[in-house]
Amino acid sequence: MGNHFQTIVDLDATRADVRSLAASGLEWLVREGIVRAELTDCVLGAPLGHPPGPFWTKAVSQEDWEPSDGLNIETGRTVFTGGQGDAMFAVCPHCAGRVDLYTDEWDTIEGAWEPFGKAIGAWHDTGDATVACPRCRRPGDLTAWTWADDYYAFGYLGFEFWDWPEFSPSFLKGFSRALGGHRTVLVGGKL
Ligand SMILES: [Zn+2]
């Protein structure tokens, strides 16, 4: 039994507007009653988070269980990942070609991972990296590549919910609107 998380990453947040976006995202969640404004000891990896609010059910597809933990807001350049495991493949933003990173049995593929690993390190350090697609040869911005199971997201703002039932598509849409219509991606997993 690990702890399960779902992180809604704002792909359009920049270093300049991340603080105000974090505040307006939280304000919306509190106004909807999805989380509470106060901070308690309810998240992993951070001292304090926002516990579930009276209307937490508005956020989830099925009320399988009551969320036991709360919301941590990550601000600053972050490589968001799905926790255990890895992405089996990446998809090029130009040609939509699929680049396999592992075999179906999760064996490493010689040389497949290295350019991505290097780019992820560079993005972490500088906020800027590209990977040349082995299929179409064009360099694609690391943040524009997509990943099997949405395993990775690269961004400056993430709303990380601990131990909640699966979020509903309508909640995710509404939350994107509350973030100024920004593109978001849901990264989930277990730790
Ligand atoms: Zn390509």
Image (tube, rainbow, N blue to C red):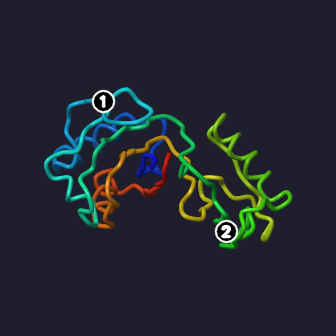
Whole-number angstrom distance, CA of label 2 to CA of label 1: 44 Å
Where ligand 1 lies, by quadrant? bottom right
Q: Is mark 2 within 8 Å of ligand 1?
A: yes
**Which label's residue is closer to the chain start, 2 or 1?**
1
Q: Position of residue 78 (x, y in %)?
A: 54, 39
Instruction: Name the residue located 80 percent from the left edge and 51 percent from the top edge.
Output: 114
Q: Is residue 159 above or below residue 183?
A: above
- Judge from the rendering whether residue 24 lies leftward or rightward of residue 150; answer left or right: left
Dividing the picture into quarters, in which one does residue 13 lie?
top left
Instruction: Name the residue located 26 percent from the left edge and 30 percent from the top edge.
Output: 40
Please tell me the numbered disc located at residue 160.
Answer: none
Q: Position of residue 74 (x, y in %)?
A: 43, 37
Instruction: Name the residue located 26 percent from the left edge and 66 percent from the top edge.
Output: 62
Instruction: Report the residue marked by disc 2.
Output: 94
Q: Position of residue 99 (x, y in %)?
A: 73, 67
Q: Please tell me how crowded label 1 is: few (under 14), some (14-19), or many (20+) other residues with Cα within 10 Å.
A: few
Q: Residue furthest right?
A: 110
Instruction: Name the residue located 80 percent from the left edge and 59 percent from the top edge.
Output: 112
Amino acid type at mark 1: Asp
Please tell me the numbered disc located at residue 41.
Answer: 1
Q: Nearer the viewer, residue 149 or 75?
A: 149
